[in-house]
Amino acid sequence: MCDLLWSDPQPINGRSPSKRGVGCQFGPDVTSKWCETNGIEYVVRSHEVKPEGYEMHHNGQCFTVFSAPNYCDQMNNKGAFITITGDNLTPRFTPFDAVPHPKLPPMAYANSLFGFN
């Protein structure tokens, strides 16, 4: 399960070392077998920047949702969230853009947490 949730989907079958140097990449065959074994329709994962904030993989059995727009203030990606309601398990994605930062130095809001005023 950790490999599936913390690693990245790839378009070809099988598993391979991750292009990011940690975890692995897994193909549509891995996703399909895991979903079948566990009696689920699809997997929703995160931890990978996507330009539109989300992406569908493996014939709709794997979705990546990334909720941090303009990641690290330099990626220019959208963020997104997923909505699944009631008995209808069809995922609905809502992308959104980053908003401007307040004119404060980084971590200024946390100074009081560390005893600084």
Image: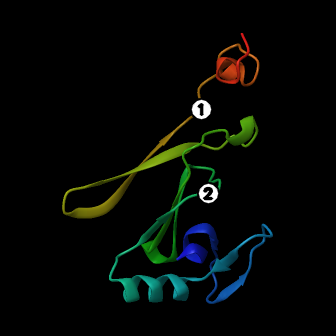
Q: Which residue is mark 1?
A: 98
Amino acid marked by disc 2: His
Q: Secondary structure at mark 2?
A: loop
State how far apart marks 1 and 2 are (Cα): 17 Å
**Can you name the residue that lies furthest to the top here?**
117
User: Which x, y percent locates residue 74?
Assistant: 76, 38
Q: Secondary structure at mark 1?
A: loop
Vertical order, 13 against 53 (above or below): below
Please, is residue 109 above or below residue 57 in the view?
A: above
Q: For the point 62% across and 54% down, which residue is it?
A: 50
Taking the image as shown, residue 112 lies to the left or right of residue 89, namely right
Q: How is the image coloured?
A: rainbow
Local packing at callout 2 (Cα closer than 10 Å; few below 14, some 14-19, many 20+) is some
Q: Earlier in the sequence, mark 1 or mark 2?
A: 2
Tell us which disc is closer to us: 1 or 2: 2
Figure check: 8 above or below 116: below
Q: Which x, y percent locates residue 17?
A: 76, 80
Callout 1–callout 2 Cβ contact below 8 Å:
no
Q: Where is residue 76 shown, x and y percent of the image?
A: 69, 40
The picture places residue 55, in percent across and down from the top left corner, at 53, 60
Q: Nearer the viewer, residue 57 or 111?
A: 111
| Disc assigned to residue 55 | none
Nearer to me, 24 or 75: 24
Residue under numbered circle 2: 47
The residue depicted at 41 percent of the width and 82 percent of the height is: 35
How crowded pointer 1 is (Cα within 10 Å; few <14, some 14-19, many 20+) is rated as some
Residue lying at 52% horizontally and 77% vertically, measured from the top left: 1
Residue 115 appears left or right of 96? right
Q: Amino acid at mark 1?
A: Ala
Q: Splitting the image into 4 quarters, where does residue 41 fall?
A: bottom left
Side of 86 relative to 34 (left or right): left
The C terminus: image quadrant:
top right
